[in-house]
Amino acid sequence: MIGQTFAAVDRIEIVGGSARGLRTRRGALAALGVPMACPARFMVLLVEDDGGQAVLWDGASYAEAIIEAERRAVVWRVPVLDRVVE
């Protein structure tokens, strides 16, 4: 509805790092023979309802990112949103 705003809920998000930006261009880069030199990075973020963000964890393992996100979600009592698989 016009004129209404809805507050976002605090949450934990799992996002891809540098490789995420290259994902859409991966085919074009491979066609040019450019190696994927940037290893995947994953981050666990606390995203607050006012838009503020804090990095709670980062690393190269998606599995570890999931574990850390679930741990942090228990501490912060918020849901987890996995942005990697969207």
Image: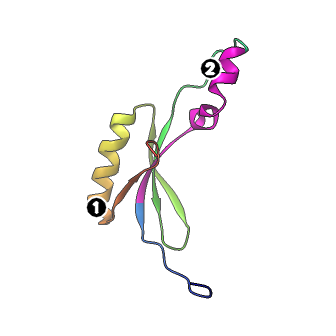
With 69 as the anchor, is 40 left or right in this view? Answer: right
- What is the three-letter code of the residue carrying label 2? Ala
Per the model, the C-alpha gap separating discs 2 and 1 is 35 Å
Colour scheme shown:
rainbow
Q: Residue at x 69, y 15 (%)?
A: 31
- Magenta stretch holds residue 16: yes
* Nearer to the camera, 66 or 59: 66
- Residue name at image x 39 percent, y 35 percent: 62
Tell me the amino acid under the disc marked 1.
Val
Q: Which numbered disc, 2 or 1, marks the residue that appears first in the sequence?
A: 2
- Identify the element where label 1 is drawn: helix
Q: Is residue 83 above or below residue 6?
A: above
Classed neighbour count for the residue bearing mark 1: other residues with Cα under 10 Å, few (<14), some (14–19), many (≥20): few
Magenta stretch: give its range. Answer: 12-31
| Front: mark 2 or 1 | 2
Where in the figure is residue 15, as x and y percent of width and height? 49, 46
* Residue 77 visible within the image: yes
- Mark 1 = which residue? 75
Who is closer to the viewer here, 76 or 66?
Answer: 66
Residue sitting at x 73%, y 14%: 32
Magenta residue check for 26? yes
| Label 2 close to label 1 by CB (< 8 Å) | no
User: Could you say which disc has been placed on residue 85 in the image?
Assistant: none
Q: Which mark is residue 37?
A: 2
